[in-house]
Image: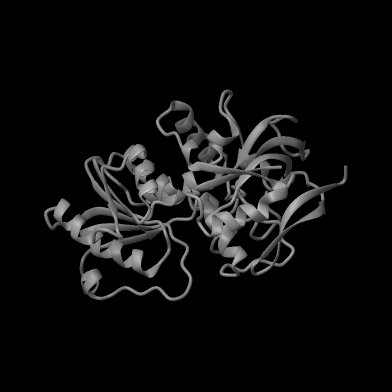
Amino acid sequence: MSSMKAAVFVEPGRIEIQQRPIPDIGPTDALLRVTTTTICGTDVHILKGEYPVKPGLIIGHEPVGVIEKLGNAVSGYHIGQRVIAGAITPCGQCHPCLDGHSSQCGGHAMGGWQLGNSIDGCQAEYVRIPNAQANLTPVPDGLSDEQVLMCPDIMSTGFGGAESGHIRIGDTVAIFAQGPIGLCATAGAKLMGATRIIVVDGVNERLEVAKRLGADITINFKEQDPLVVIREQTQGAGVDVAIEALGTQQTFESCLRALKPGGTLSSLGVYSGKLSMPLDAIAAGLGDHTIVTTLCPGGKERMRRLMEVVASGRVDLTAMVTHRFKLDDIVAAYELFSHQRDGVLKVAITP
């Protein structure tokens, strides 16, 4: 077999299944046979034309699979081995990688995000993983595809938001939006030691999932003003850390207003258009606030650590897989996911 099925970005508003050649690999690459993947909110931005990629690109950046081929410079792995690769595939050699910013690999913003962005991605039967030595992580025995499916992107991103916020034991944390990223940020905040986690969303079912992942106080913004509740819960002080997990002006501003003086806003959202900061929300720039952004940490050591968390039983994210589709039906999966119908959180796509 020399061809494969793949989900291809054709133009804004249109993704379709096409036949494509199975990728060739170079000496530092690996070819994965994809066994499970998923759709990310960033893929929806691509579909809508809000994030530009080249027409004809195979999209997707969250692969679980089996090694089909290995480049001759790749060692320590074997054909048939179950592995994952992160959404971010750093080289491990350039200045940003060696400087501790591997997500920015190559020296330009978001340079580590290649799959489904600058090279063909994994919503396909096969995918080429670049710099395989730095990016392939074996899946521990006993863990299913769906147990590790969140590791390549949303788990790493959500946990990264908690880590970048430098949450400390005893902190009060507010997390705005409880989609997949926000839910992982909630779980990450719990692991980091936050003892009061306040989450905000407009969907009660998501708030229930948030409780299971560590939320202490849930706020449906359609029923209550989150900032009023947060002020009441903190005796007017504000929270130590606020995590923005949606990417809108409203949620970003709400995070600012929820902070105590000296607090940290940890931003995970993908923004489009202009983002502004009202003077009062940042105390005219004199509130000692910290604003930090995070792009999903990648690389094989990051993936190993995340799978260790899953294997330990400290976090179980399998409930986030609410729908399952075959690759042939991915257009229907996009329609469901992009319109957030039927209580969808994440979909599992199986070639």
Q: Which residue is drawn at 30% across and 46% down?
A: 167
- Residue 139 percent location from the top left of the image: 59, 31
**In this rendering, is residue 187 above or below 314?**
below
Q: Give the answer, above or below, for where 78 lies relative to 71.
A: above
Location of residue 256 with respect to 210 vertically, above or below: below
| Residue at left offset 74%, top offset 63% | 56
Corner quadrant of residue 36: top right
- Confirm whether residue 204 shows in the render: yes
- The residue sitting at the right extreme is 1
Residue 112, can we see it?
Answer: no
Q: Residue furthest left?
A: 235
Q: In this view, does 250 lie above or below 122?
A: below
Q: In which quarter of the image is the N terminus?
A: top right
Lateral position of residue 296 relative to residue 221, left or right:
right
* Residue 266 shown left or right of residue 230 in the figure: right
Q: Where is residue 228 in the image (x, y as percent from the top left)?
A: 19, 60
Does residue 242 appear left or right of residue 57 in this picture?
Answer: left
Residue 343 or 156: which is nearer the viewer? Answer: 343
Please state the horizontal and vertical placement of residue 86, each as a whole percent of the image: 58, 45
Residue 253 vs residue 284, the one in the foreground: 253
Locate the C terminus by quadrant: top right
x 40%, y 73%: residue: 275
